[in-house]
Each structure stands twice: as C-alpha cells, then as structure tokens.
Amino acid sequence: MSASLLGLFGISFLAATLLPAQSELSLSSLIYLDTEPVVLLVLAASLGNTLGSVVNWALGRGAVHFSNAAWFPVKADKLDKATAWYHRYGRWSLLLSWAPVVGDPLTLAAGVLKEPFWSFLALVAIAKTGRYLIVALITLGVLQF
C-alpha cells in the first residue's frame, strides 16, 4: 500500500474522531495530484473515516457504564429520554454522520444509546462513502455547483 493511501486512511480516521482533521481536502489534493486511482483513494478515505466512527461508537458504549456516576454529564432520566428518541428517530440520523460539527458526536451518541453495531456500521459506511464520492466527483469536475 502506498504512502498516499496510508496517509489518507490515517487523516480520514482522525477526522472521524473528535479530533480536528481535513480529510476532504486531503482526498481532493491526492485526486488532483493523480497519485493513485480515484477508486482506491475514495476507498481508503471511506474505510479510515468509517473505522474512526467505530472508535467513537465503542467509546460511547464504554461510557454507558459510568452513567450512574455523579460526575457523568447526562443524568439517567435524560439518558432514558434520549435513548427513546434515538430508537425512534436516531438510527436514520446516522446518515448525517458525514456532516461537519454534528456527525462525529452523533456516532458517539449512537454508542452511548446502544445502537446495534451492524446497523451502525452499515449506515455510517453509506454516509461516509457517499460524502467521499461526492468530493471526488466535484474534484474531477463531474459535479458542479
């Protein structure tokens, strides 16, 4: 695997966590530089970003063990209400996991609220891959705004 693909995977992974990183700019730059086939670049970015979201989900799942602690930022009754809301609307909101600002915390909340892993993974992978496909198509000039 090339340094371009590994680097893009790493940046995309970090961008999916609560750490700031610009994976879209990296993807566009590598497409422009023609370092690798576009399909491989989109796959590397999508895989890295999706796996970063899995880390958020896992952190959320682990945080739930502390929900009864006095220092936990969300009280049990509010967590119960959020869980009910999430089970009613939340699963599909994971299709917004690509979005700036709300996407990464949404993946963390999915873990806290016990979203099943496989539905989480499928919805987040669709969202993340869709975003990178659009970035690639814009960079290639196929899509214009």
Image (cartoon, helix red, strand yellow):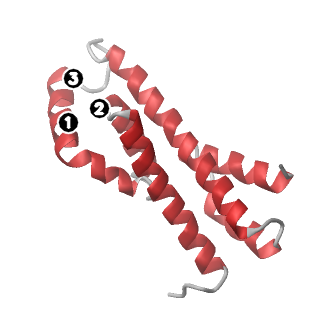
- Three-letter amino acid code of the residue under disc 3: Lys
Contact between marks 2 and 3 (CB within 8 A): the answer is no
Give me the disc on residue 113. 2
Question: Which is nearer the eye, 94 or 100?
Answer: 94
* Cα–Cα span, label 2 and label 3: 13 Å
Q: Name the residue rendered at 43%, 47% in the picture.
A: 122
Mark 3 lies on a secondary structure that is loop
Question: Where does the image place residue 101, in percent across and percent down from the top left?
Answer: 43, 53
Question: Where does the image place residue 5, in percent across and percent down from the top left?
Answer: 77, 54
Q: Which residue is mark 1?
A: 82
- Three-letter amino acid code of the residue under disc 2: Leu
Contact between marks 2 and 1 (CB within 8 A): the answer is yes
**Earlier sequence position, callout 3 versus callout 1:** 3
- 35 in relation to 78, above or below: below
Question: Which is nearer the eye, 129 or 55?
Answer: 129
Indicate which label's residue lies in the foreground, 3 or 1: 1
* Label 3 environment density (alpha carbons within 10 Å; few <14, some 14–19, many ≥20): few
Q: Which residue is mark 3?
A: 75
Q: Name the residue rendered at 30%, 11% in the picture.
A: 69
- 60 in relation to 36, above or below: above
- Three-letter amino acid code of the residue under disc 1: Ala
Q: Name the residue rendered at 42%, 20% in the picture.
A: 62
Q: Name the residue rendered at 16%, 28% in the picture.
A: 80
- 120 in relation to 143, above or below: above
Question: Where does the image place residue 132, in percent across and percent down from the top left?
Answer: 57, 64
Question: Where does the image place residue 66, in percent across and percent down from the top left?
Answer: 34, 15
Give me the disc on residue 141. none
Viewed as shown, does residue 85 lie left or right of 48?
Answer: left
